[in-house]
Amino acid sequence: MHPFAWQRLKSEDILQDRWLSLRADTCQLPNGRIIAPYYVLEYPPWVNVVARTHEHDVVLVCQYRHGVQQTVLELPAWTVETTDPSPLAAVQRELLEETGYAGAHVVETGRLSPNSANHANWTYCFLATGAEHVAAPLVEDTEHVETVLMPLSEKAGETMWLRGMIFDLDGTLGDTLPVCIQAFQRTFHHYLGHLWKMLICRPPVHSRLLYRYIWHRGEMRSRHASQSASDQRA
């Protein structure tokens, strides 16, 4: 056990539902202090995917999210069902059901904690290349989902990712949008870090997405450096 770790002395189930469970822990810190209650949310595992088509478009979904009460554009993401044998099987099934797309090659790029402070579950991230539209989406009567293809190119890629994983289509996020952008950039850079490790450990992989992003970021930094040098000379 790590010396920073807390010791869980007692747990009480507050709520148990199909989609989440809430428990209250009594915890002892390394210095002996007791914290009670400490609430922990237990969700099933989550998955998300960056699905890229042969035309270098990224498959996104537009739908209403009641938590933020906004219609948003985001990466396809779902909950792993108990009937799914693995997160990989879950992301393949859900990508097909929700968007009608299937990836020729699907690889896991990393595992992230959505909120390590009080979420007990993990989010599994995937990259799907060679995605093709093979069937009509199977949308439930409680959902209204639209599939959106966004080009991933040297010119459009930076704009796309700067919009953030959550992009308000009504334009009412106002001053909170930069916060969403910064949070997404940190998450996406971490995502690329996992992808880079995967490419080093298991070559060859369809890596044009990563190389294009790295090339574009290098170009942007070079331009900023040149502009700064010109400003200083002026």
Image: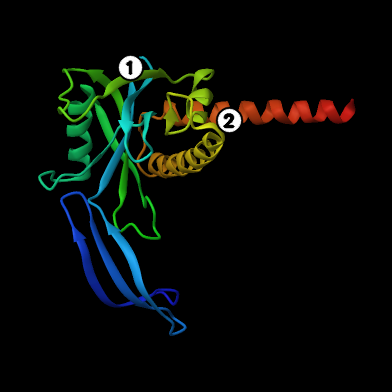
Label placed on residue 125: none
Q: Compared to 196, does 206 lie above or below?
A: above
Image quadrant where one finds the N terminus: bottom left
Q: Between disc 2 and disc 1, whose residue precedes?
A: 1
Q: Indicate the quadrant where residue 210 lies.
A: top left
Residue 51 lies, with reference to residue 6, above or below; the image says above
Residue 154 shown left or right of residue 200 in the figure: right
Residue at point 15%, 50% (across, down): 18
Outermost residue to the left: 83
Q: Give the x, y percent position of residue 165.
A: 42, 34
Specify few, some or many for label 1: CA neighbours under 10 Å numbering under 14, 14-19, or 20 or more: few
Q: Position of residue 161 (x, y in %)?
A: 48, 29
Residue plotted at (78% across, 30% down): 228
What type is the residue that disc 1 sits on? His
Location of the C terminus (image quadrant) = top right
- Judge whether 8 appears above or below 76 on screen: below
Asked if the residues shown at circle 2 and circle 1 are in contact, with their CB atoms under 8 angstroms apart, the answer is no
Instruction: Describe the element under mark 1 as helix, strand or loop.
Output: loop
Tally of numbered discs: 2
State how far apart marks 2 and 1 are (Cα). 23 Å
Residue 128 in the image: above or below residue 183: above
Q: Which amino acid, by three-letter code, is at mark 2?
A: Arg
Residues 195 and 47: in front is 47
Q: Which residue is mark 1?
A: 54
Check disc 2 and report the residue beneath it.
217
> Where residue 101 appears, x then y in whole percent?
23, 22
Q: Secondary structure at mark 2?
A: helix
Q: How is the image coloured?
A: rainbow
Circle 2 crowding by C-alpha within 10 Å: few under 14, some 14–19, many from 20: some
Q: Position of residue 159 (x, y in %)?
A: 52, 23
Q: Residue at x 17, y 33 (%)?
A: 93
